[in-house]
């Protein structure tokens, strides 16, 4: 079998960093639920971007608090960073564990803003 073909007969292989990112997302999301910290009560891990060398991973999140809660959430996640990295190290099979960095998911927030604008525009035209 060719090295860059999947077992199901061909096509591109799923990039390693994407596979690791998805695994990290699952592990971190599960751990966040276990933390008894109200700052993280409504935080959702939306995605993880892992560099190809697996040195760093950006953990993207969203929450019901929106932008107003970002600073407090980033502070809480930073406090738990070592614990999260330890959990990741125990659960994945890799030579090294990426250093975690936390950022709000601006793509989701941009989509929400666009949706709000479109909804307001529909309401304005529908009522005119």
Image (cartoon, rainbow, N blue to C red):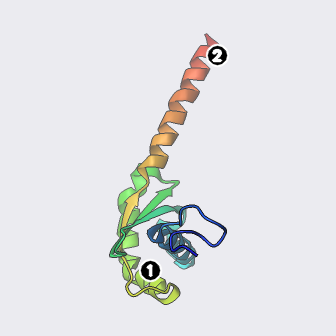
In the rendering, at what x and y percent does residue 10 appear?
60, 64
Q: Residue at x 38, y 60 (%)?
A: 103
* SS assignment at label 2: helix
Q: Residue at x 44, y 61 (%)?
A: 60
Q: Tell whether 76 sits left or right of 63.
A: left
Q: Quadrant of residue 6?
A: bottom right
Looking at marks 2 and 1 on the same chain, the residue that comes earlier in the sequence is marked by: 1
In the rendering, at what x and y percent does residue 128 appear?
61, 10
Q: Tell whether 78 sits left or right of 3.
A: left
Q: CA distance from mark 2 to mark 1?
A: 49 Å
* SS assignment at label 1: helix
Question: Mark 2 or mark 1, which is nearer to you?
Answer: 1
Residue 101 - label: none
Residue lying farthest right? 8
In the rendering, at what x and y percent does residue 115 appear?
54, 35
Q: Residue at x 67, y 69 (%)?
A: 8
What residue does disc 1 label?
Answer: 84
In the rendering, at what x and y percent does residue 15 appear?
48, 67
Which is nearer the eye, 11 or 119? 11
Q: Residue at x 50, y 41 (%)?
A: 111
What residue does disc 2 label?
Answer: 126
Which is nearer the eye, 26 or 126? 26
């Amino acid at each position: 079998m060719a090295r860059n073909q999947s077992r199901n007969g061909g096509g591109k292989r799923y990039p390693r960093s994407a596979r690791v990112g998805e695994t990290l997302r699952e592990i971190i999301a599960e751990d966040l639920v276990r933390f008894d910290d109200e700052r993280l009560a409504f935080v959702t891990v939306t995605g993880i971007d892992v560099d190809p060398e697996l040195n760093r991973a950006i953990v993207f999140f969203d929450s019901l608090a929106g932008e107003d809660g970002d600073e407090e959430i980033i502070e809480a996640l930073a406090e738990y960073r070592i614990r999260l990295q330890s959990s990741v190290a125990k659960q994945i099979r890799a030579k090294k564990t990426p250093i975690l960095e936390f950022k709000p998911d601006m793509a989701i927030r941009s989509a929400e803003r666009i949706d709000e604008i479109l909804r307001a525009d529909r309401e304005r035209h529908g009522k005119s």
